[in-house]
Image (tube, grey):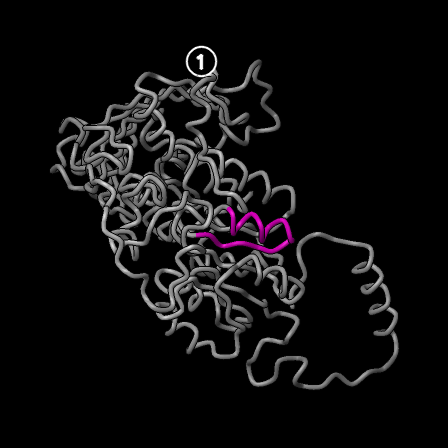
Amino acid sequence: MVPSQQPNASRRRFLAGAAAALAAPYVIPASVLGAEGQAPPSDKLNIAGIGVGGQGAGDIGAVAGGNNVVALCDVHAERAGGTFKKFAGAKQYQDFRKMLDEMHAQIDAVVVATPDHTHAVAAIAAMKLGKHVYCEKPLTRTVYESHLMRVTAAKHKVATQMGNQGSASEGLRRAVELAWAGVCGELRECHLWLANGDGPQERPKDTPPVPAGLDWDLWLGPAPQRPYHPCYVPFQWRRWRAFGSGGAGDMGCHSINMAFRALRLDLLWNPDPAEKPEKPPVIRVEAEASEIHPETYPRTIKGQFDIPARGKLPPLKVHWYNGGLKPPKEVLRGYTMTQWGCLVGGEKAAILSTCPWNTNMFLLPQAEFKDFKGPEKTLPRGPGHHAEWVRACKGGPAAFSNFDIGAPMNEIVHLVHVATLAKKPIEYDPQACKIINAPDLNPLLHREYRAGWTL
């Protein structure tokens, strides 16, 4: 079992004793060294999964190699049956709170892949116990939850990773390198357009029976009580405000990934210590939705972020379109309009990704960069998105989409929804997690939890 990254007195005493013991001759069994290519037990993580029937099945499979899957939790036993069978030695649970209470001493790291509305309660509970956390995107359902995820991870010094898997791709990392190298000149524009959206839907009035093996009360978690209906489970929960983050949230953390990094928007949350701004940065956000429905997210959203300077980087505007809305064709500098796009531009050129996961990239205008090689690579290339997190859990470098990056990125995505509900421009202090021009709107940054559920 790999210990948490939090040093303590008992661990120091153990290491001191171990050093003394090694001074004497000792024959170490081959099994302890990891014979025949196997990892020694001390290099294996004890991993638990929360939400292992859908995306979580793939996540657990991706981190299991060379490690121990010791506990699995899913509120729908039948849906998670394949994962339970694959890791038959893992103890099975339906309530993650019981799992963490009973097995926290045997767990090093936790993978969270539940619906959005239970990401934060599960991940924060694990981090408070000193457990490393991999959490699927969108990181949370609310802005405040994202803020607290970042703060909690830093406080407990745990290794984290958000599940926007394109972060590990060559296309995304190369795009960021080119942006940072000044290939485009001074970056002053950004456009993001997403093909997916939602639309009005009334809450169903019929109450069909709950499927066998599904604990509906646990599935609801912190969300308000309502009867089970198949329009929520599985997957369709995304469009409902009580549970998901809409089309914008579903793909936003994938599709804005390159731009967020290229523009160094993370500095608004985690400023360079060498910089001493006179006052905290403020992000101005305004957005218009096709309609506002109390139950579901809108069909389309058009928004704009006024981003302040980040150190020596200039202010700029980030333009948001989803549900099929698109930017003016001129921003593509001759490239054919696409269904999805993430573009950052300066006076010399623009960088475009047409893949929702930002795994490809093009320099525009293309004719001017036909034989362009570009500067040397400056960002590390990792072993893969999941493997990066495993490596970080074992004391390696921080994963590329750790919560210092993932949480602010998720706040940006959710601020679009907040601005549509505000129905007027909001001015957001990212470091304080507050709307400063209209404090009465701060409740929009979070949602009240059902009794028995806390962060």
Image spot of residue 389 (x, y percent)? 51, 57
Q: Which image quarter: residue 208?
A: bottom left
Task: Say if 163 sits above or below 57 in the image.
Answer: above
- Magenta run includes residue 292: no
Tag 1 residue = 437
**SS at badge 1:** loop
- Where 223 sits versus 348, above or below? below
Residue visible at 19% across and 41% down in the picture: 195
Q: Nearer the viewer, residue 138 or 193?
A: 138
Looking at the picture, tell me which residue is in the foreground, 415 or 204: 204
Name the residue type under label 1: Asn
Quadrant that contains the N terminus: bottom right
**In percent of the image, x 44 and y 13: which residue is there?**
437
Rendered-image quadrant of the C terminus = top right
Residue 398 left/right relative to 42: left
Residue 67 visible to the viewer: no
Please determine whether, in this image, residue 17 is positioned above or below residue 147: below
Decide: few, some or many residues near mark 1? Use Cα within 10 Å; few <14, some 14-19, many ≥20: some
Q: Which residues are magenta?
A: 121-135
In the shown orientation, is residue 412 left or right of residue 93?
A: left
- Residue 430 or residue 25, whichever sits in front: 430
Q: Is residue 132 magenta-colored?
A: yes
Quadrant hosting residue 294: top left
Q: Quadrant of residue 376?
A: top left
Residue 398, position in %: x, y?
55, 50
Q: Position of residue 173 (x, y in %)?
A: 38, 46
Can you give x and y, in whole percent of width and height, for residue 76 in the image? 39, 64
Residue lying at 26% horizontally and 36% vertically, measured from the top left: 297
Residue 68 appears in view: yes
Q: How many marks?
A: 1
